[in-house]
Amino acid sequence: MTDMAKSHPVAATDKTTSDGSMETAIVRIAGDSGDGVQLVGGRFSINSALSGNDLVTFPDFPAEIRAPTGSIYGVSAYQLHFGGRDIKTIGDHVDVLVAFNPAALKTNLPRLARGGILIVDRSGFSASNLRKAGYETSPLEDNSLDGYALMQLDIGKMTLLATTPFGLTKKQALRCKNFFALGLLFWLFDRDRSKTAVWITEKFAKQPEIANANIAAMNAGHSHGETIELAGDLSKIHVPTYKMEPGLYRAITGADAMAYGLAAAAELSNRQLLLASYPITPSSNILHKLANMKELGIVTFQAEDEIAAAGAALGASYAGALGVTASSGPGVALKMEMIGLAVATELPLIIINSQRAGPSTGLPTKTEQSDLYQSVFGRNGDAPLPVLVARSPGDSFYCAIEAARIAQKYMTPVILLTDGFINNTSEPWSIPDINELPRIEVPNRTDPTDYQPY
């Protein structure tokens, strides 16, 4: 069953034209960490890219470690801003919010624009979950959601019905409810779901019953949307395509772009790349990416601490390689004495700082850009160095190359700032031809006589 708010959702937002189209749309999916929010958010993003939209995504992971199920601290969310024009940010006010439980609703409702579409899984609104989220009464019954186009769906029950033929346990079947929601979103934005069905089949190739159940749940969600449309409760939303420059594109996160940029910089300067790092969120993704690129001659070194990582990277630069060390604010603070040594010895060194909210283990995914003063002034004595800042995921690629160019040309350490937001955000990226990128021509000196690096 579907309960709709009195306001008509398509007419409720000033972004929607009379023919039901929107130049851009912002969708946010939220639930517990085990609800598969990131998985279906990623699939909806890929579907939007294949449909010709420009987009920016943001996976919003819970910062707390192993937060209790149903609590506001354990809410995981995925936001997608897509449309028929150049998209620069994840957007402010969400047009469509999917909430699988009360905690997801409570933490994300302030982001939903008044009159926006609110899709709620009624099966998740048990008395226990309401209590965990701090609700005294159910928001589905106390008229507190009257300002939104509310769709109350028993997604759990409908998912169980759709997956009955495949012999799954109740727990296994309920795990498919994220694909029911995805199918409903595919209907709402008039999207083809065939490629997602192929992807599901490939992903669960060794578990065909799971694959078939997820596809059935997705189709059931789409069919439910068609039923809503026939009843006149909700209409499809059309988002136009974006005329992008011709080329080969892929979705890329800031962390992946940074890793590819470092690899390209090593190729352009004809040097071996060594990344020495100590694992720290959200910087570790760069280490993980480069560790899987050994075929390019890239060496990654997981050091025992931050100081050792900086020392190893500096040693690689001393030996003629391209030395890089990556960390977050707390780790960069520990590297400062070694960075001062790089200034004094006039050696190229790239220090990547993926900024975050603070040193606490419980806040690794919360974003801040608070390390600028540390980067510019955070060394002993007179030790100036260049500081670069990436502005987007795709820009991280070119910033990495520019950092390598400056470091080697001027024999100086360079700090490259990014943050948790850019590292995890993704956008369409035009894959460049490395043969068209300017080379970094800084040959090694083989005769040390009277050699002054500066």
Image (cartoon, rainbow, N blue to C red):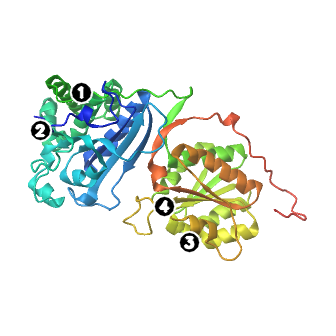
**Mark with earlier residue (4, 2):** 2
Left or right relative to 216: residue 409: right
Of labels 4 and 3, the one closer to you: 3
Name the spot of residue 115 as percent of width and height, x first.
25, 41
Residue at image mark 1: 235
Q: In which quarter of the image is residue 206?
A: top left
Of labels 4 and 2, the one closer to you: 2
Name the spot of residue 287 as percent of width and height, x first.
52, 54
Whether residue 423 is situated above or below residue 313 in the rendered picture: above
Left or right relative to 350: residue 74: left
Q: Are marks 1 and 2 in contact (CB under 8 Å)?
A: no
Judge the density around disc 1: few (<14), some (14-19), many (≥20) Cα neighbours within 10 Å: many
Residue at image mark 3: 334
Name the spot of residue 1 as percent of width and height, x first.
10, 34
**Mark with earlier residue (1, 2):** 2
Judge the density around disc 4: few (<14), some (14-19), many (≥20) Cα neighbours within 10 Å: many
Give the spatial CA distance, label 3 vs label 1: 56 Å
Give the spatial CA distance, label 4 vs label 2: 42 Å
Q: Looking at the rendered structure, which numbered label has been put on residue 157? A: 2
Residue drawn 43% across the image and 26% down it = 241
Left or right relative to 409: residue 332: left
Q: Are marks 2 and 3 in contact (CB under 8 Å)?
A: no
Type of amino acid under label 2: Lys
**Mark with earlier residue (1, 4):** 1
Give the spatial CA distance, label 4 vs label 3: 14 Å
Give the spatial CA distance, label 1 vs label 4: 48 Å
